[in-house]
Amino acid sequence: MGVSDQERLTVVGGAGFLGSAIVERCLARGRGVVPVDRADRCTPSPGVTPVRADLLTDPLPEVLSGLPAGPVALSAGNSDPRAVRSWQLVLDNAVTTARLLPLLAGRRVTLVSSVEVYGTATGPQHEGTLPELPLDEDALRAWNADLLAIAAQPCPPWRVERLCRRLADADVSGRWVYAMAKRAQELLVADTVPEDRLTLLRVTNLFGPGQDRVVARLARRALAGLPLTVVDTRRTFLPVEVLADAVAAGAPAGVLNAGAGCIDLVELAQLVLDELGLDADVRTVVAPTADAVGVVDTTRFEELTGVGGAHLRDALRSFVRRLRDEPPPMGPSIPVVVPPRPERPELLADRMQQSLWTGSLKGGPWGSALTNELRERLELPDTMTVLATSSGTAALRLATVAVAGRAQPGDVAVLPSFTFAATGEYLAMLGYRLRFCDVRPDTWTLDPARLEEALAGGDVRVVVAVDALGAPADYDAVMAVCRRHGVPVVGDSAPSLGGRSRGRPVGTQADAHAFSMSFAKVVSAAGQGGAVVVPTEAVERLRSSVDWTRSTLIGEVHAAAALDQVERLDHLVARRTAVAGVYAELERADPRVVPQRAADGDQHAWVHWVARFPGVDRDRLAKRLEARGIGTKPYYSPVLHRLPWRPFTERAPDLPVTDALHDEALALPMSSELSVGEAERVFWSVLDALSDCADDPR
């Protein structure tokens, strides 16, 4: 007998960690279920036909009209405690729910919320505890009213960012943004669904397959031989299958704190080690004073489901054993390059529209503001000038013409072979013969000793020092060598906007510097742009008698995009540095990982995170990671001296470090858009893939 529409459960967020568990439990119970999620997350499975929808931007009346008339479970949203942008927690939870309210009218609804909504209220917190958050109930309802006024229309981020920031900015600490978003979500649903038809599940710390949070991180660190660090506090936990079964079975109306009991985190760490048969030190740190949500009264839920302290510990042990025997969870694919999104999408949209509407497409306010911001960020003296350009290659061309001019017959340019092809291409276009030089084994930037050899013939007109992948070149040593030979230096700083050399921003160390703002860089000028720093006295020379700048300066639309990110440059670099911090432990976990380093006193800009994998079949490793949804790329392969450059190059000398990089270097995903949680997924996937390489030739 078929299942009627009145009995089918619509699971909003049905492809997520919790949503997919609810769908699975419904199927196990023989209950009809319809998952709703984004198209890139939904995959059909036996007995289930998902509904694909972007809840923020799709015309929802058309989507909602095709859903069954039965009950609804709301499990969509974002619960990442380390989200890249806190205001997106508001977007993904409160705004999405406001858009869905028409679906809920007249239905039985289960909303999965969080015990975080209690905020700093004194614990143990029970269902009647009043939330204590940076905004009180009246303020949250007033914010909801503003949200509802626009939620009937599509709500892409660039239309509702300002509203989301209003809520996020109410908490200067950033600790309670998620809690306020979830409480706003609760109020939205409670004002739409009658009390006797609404189940509100305030969930504690979930754990289960497909999720990497506290329990999984402790287990995976232990398995990797890394130290365990926990805060000195207790937490309430819940196996995901217990919560999913309660939703699938139909929990009673009312508010329930969903948990299976508490455990001290030091005890949890020891439980993990005991179950894995491992011995390691467990370090404790003091819990932050603002971190008030710990022990929660979950008595009513435990009585309803029959779970408790003994069940919790058994479930924890079972989950840890599963983690030992199974690979890390899959998830949405993570490309090796994730272009940075706008930092202030609503403001940027306004600026771009202003340029397009007024016809001010070049030489307008955004290009001027961008160059002023760059001058300040790079700490340029009056003797240096910055120009915003249409590309990084255009910037390199201007930098070289400014300090060395076009090549004369027989002129040579020295450059590393370990770099992007454009570094060699623009020099060849200017008429230079290319002489490749090896790089240092640690930073992968020009080796000063090999540079001295390359300059010995006296025919070199310019040296291009590349900040490899965002690591500054050894400018002190390179400049000293070149000064002795009377040769100017161009810094190919394409990837190092935001990097620092000996404590100062990269941009004043060489005779001229060129930066890129392509889609892969720290700052992306809508995918295409750059900047050049040249001596002020050379600017006029660039513009006469042939104007080298005429077609190479940035347009206003691209300048507006670049300005948005340059104004937040420190934050962008900090996010990348946090991702690099996660990857840095790979070397400790597996000696076959040899990452690139920045020199002492330098700050890497982390455009890419690349390591050598000596003794490992790099192609096999990359394929294993691809199968796990992790993008990689062999930066740079082929290296330049292995490309068919003739007649533009000399025969390359022996370049042993560059050749090793050609064979062994592999980039992992890196972006200011990656969260620490996503970086940890990459981390565990690399270790898992390397474990399959144990039989690779050494």
Image: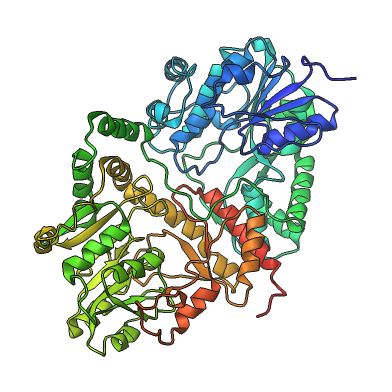
Q: Position of residue 497 (x, y in %)?
A: 32, 57
- In this view, 618 is above or below 146: below
Q: Nearer the viewer, residue 197 or 598?
A: 598
Q: Position of residue 692 (x, y in %)?
A: 71, 67
Q: Residue at x 20, y 49 (%)?
A: 371
**In the rendered image, which quarter is residue 300 located in?**
top right
Position of residue 1 in the picture relative to residue 15 (left or right): right
Q: Is residue 502 visible?
A: no
Q: Position of residue 507 (x, y in %)?
A: 24, 62
Q: Residue at x 54, y 25 (%)?
A: 58
Q: Where does the N terminus fall, quadrant-wise?
A: top right
Q: Nearer the viewer, residue 564 or 257?
A: 564
Q: Where does the C terminus fall, quadrant-wise?
A: bottom right
Position of residue 421 in the picture relative to residue 370 (left or right): right
Please name the colour scheme applied to the rendered image. Answer: rainbow
**In the rendered image, which quarter is residue 626 located in?**
bottom right
Position of residue 386 in the picture relative to residue 160 (left or right): left
Q: Nearer the viewer, residue 257 or 500?
A: 500
Q: Nearer the viewer, residue 645 or 46?
A: 645
How many numbered marks appear?
0
Q: Is residue 247 visible?
A: yes
Q: Position of residue 113 (x, y in %)?
A: 61, 28
Q: Residue at x 22, y 80 (%)?
A: 409
